[in-house]
Image (cartoon, coloured by chain):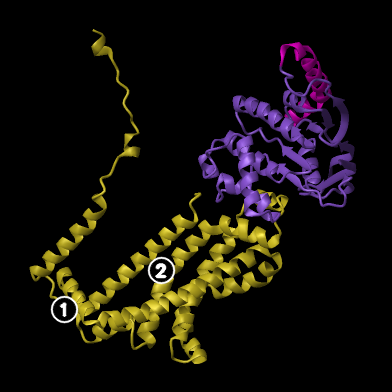
Chain colours: A purple, B yellow
Amino acid sequence: MRIVIENVDKTFVDAKKREVTALQNINFAIEQQEFVVLVGPSGCGKSTLLNIVGGLMSPSNGSVYFEGTDSKKPNLGIVFQEIALFPWRTVYENVIYGLEESGASKQEQQEKGKHYIDMVGLSGFENAYPKQLSGGMRQRAGIARALAIEPDLLLMDEPFSALDAQTRTIMQEELLTIWDRTRLSTLYVTHNIQEAVYLADRVIVLSRHPGQIKSTIRIDLPKIGRDKDEYRMRFEQYVDEIWQLIRHDAQEASREG
Amino acid sequence: MPDKQRQVITNRVAFLETKIPSYAAVLGITVLLVLWEIVCRLGIVPPLFLPAPTAILTAGWDMLVSGELYEDLAASLVRIGGGYAVGASLGIIFGLILGFSRWTDAILTPIVYSIYPIPKIALLPLIILWLGIGETPKLAIIALGVFFPVVINTFSGVKNVDPMLIKAAVTFGSNHFNVVRKVILPASLPMIFAGLKLAAGTSLLLLVSAEMIAAQQGIGSMVLHYGNLMITTKLMVGVLVLSLLGLTFNRVLQWLERKLVPWK
């Protein structure tokens, strides 16, 4: 199964009634079990693109489709930047939300709920409300909720950007471990280049005004353990290569505020 | 001497954390009751105008034992309970629909807002004309009075739901009905309860007014009856019962809110 993003354009009408092109001519595919990271400066439309792929926004032109799903309706698991846990539901009730909506039996809900809560390391917090958790733990619950429906495509929209740097590093490591166990096709959006190189099989670099694919870079490093010394040189080369692609746009973006 | 140079820094915002003993809440009300009792005992105010608290309590106990109070209270409880339940349920349902569907919002909201400011008791004669003189018009007027604050609060609760949560629910497979049931309803609960509490006061007011205008039984008619007879002590028993009714009402709602909104 692969997911194809074909000729996607997105135009908005801004407050001054001018037409703004957020995305232009986006074409790429996510292969089975592939981890694709979209990276770009702020305002490059990467979150817009993720929303379009996630079915939360319609493209102005083009389409997004799954290939080889045997006419089964593909399901998507989304991890939101804002986390978007339901405050009135406990961790467990949040995690099984998608299962509940798909009509899974109580027993299946319990099994999968427990399985994925264990996987993200939240055992013992099943009955806590989101408000009682730290930011990192909330996002763990958000990830478990997305994993629990065993999605055909996992979408993650800057899931760790609201976390502090240390928590973020830990979460990145754990995400890789989790991903290695589940091997889900994943589309991940970030503005953090290190994060992109650390996680991705393939990095797609977007430019801004309009948002276009500037370059696609395959990360030719073993998926697990890229932070080891022996890969440090090549890791830094990838980071630098991407930074050179983005730098000019990022500078412009920061001047616009 | 190092001792003399030492500058101890103390918490200058300790007043923010001052601990108040639990008896403080009882203190104010006790002092008021004692003062009231003294004023009456000393004969400063004649008992016709203001009976002593002990006299009111004794009269209340007698009325309770003789069963006189029970009949009035039961009649009132049925009216307010029924009217409130009907008004609140309809208010919540309509509020959810109005908030969720843009069409009904556009069509019905102007109507709701134009009926809202009418003091509902003014509609009682009309409602009696429509529904006769039984229990129905009293229930209806209370339901009407409860409906509006609840519908308006529910409506604004729905409008304030974080769209991110709705997106999350849809992503995980919710249809429109489940979005309303599982996301919009719980998210609006805090606002709904604000409306329910507001409506509790309104319902009590309408209960007493309606009973004073058109009822043989009930706390409202009892208060009016003893007022006409100038039996102030029994009149004050009625007032006391109303005050306790209001307090209990509020407590029940608070308890329910804590049960239903444990995540706040």
Circle 1 residues within 10 Å: few <14, some 14–19, many ≥20:
few
**Chain letter for the residue marked with disc 1 in the picture:** B
Highlighted magenta segment, given as a residue range = A228-257
- What is the quadrant of residue A42 in the picture? top right
The chain under label 2 reads B
Q: Quadrant of residue A190?
A: top right
Q: Amino acid at mark 2?
A: Gly
Q: Quadrant of the N terminus of chain B?
A: top left
Q: Which mark is residue B48?
A: 1
Mark 1 and mark 2: Cα distance apart in space:
29 Å
Residue B201: numbered disc: 2
Residue at the image point whose x is 42% and y is 62% from the top:
B253
Q: Is residue A230 magenta?
A: yes
Q: State the count of labels.
A: 2
Q: Residue at x 21, y 82 (%)?
A: B66
Where is residue A144 drawn, in percent x and y?
Answer: 65, 40
- Relative to residue B229, is residue B141 drawn left or right? right
Return the residue found at the far top.
B1
Res B163 seen here: no
Front residue of B232 and B186: B186
Q: Please tell me whether residue B189 is drawn above or below residue A46 in the rendered image.
A: below
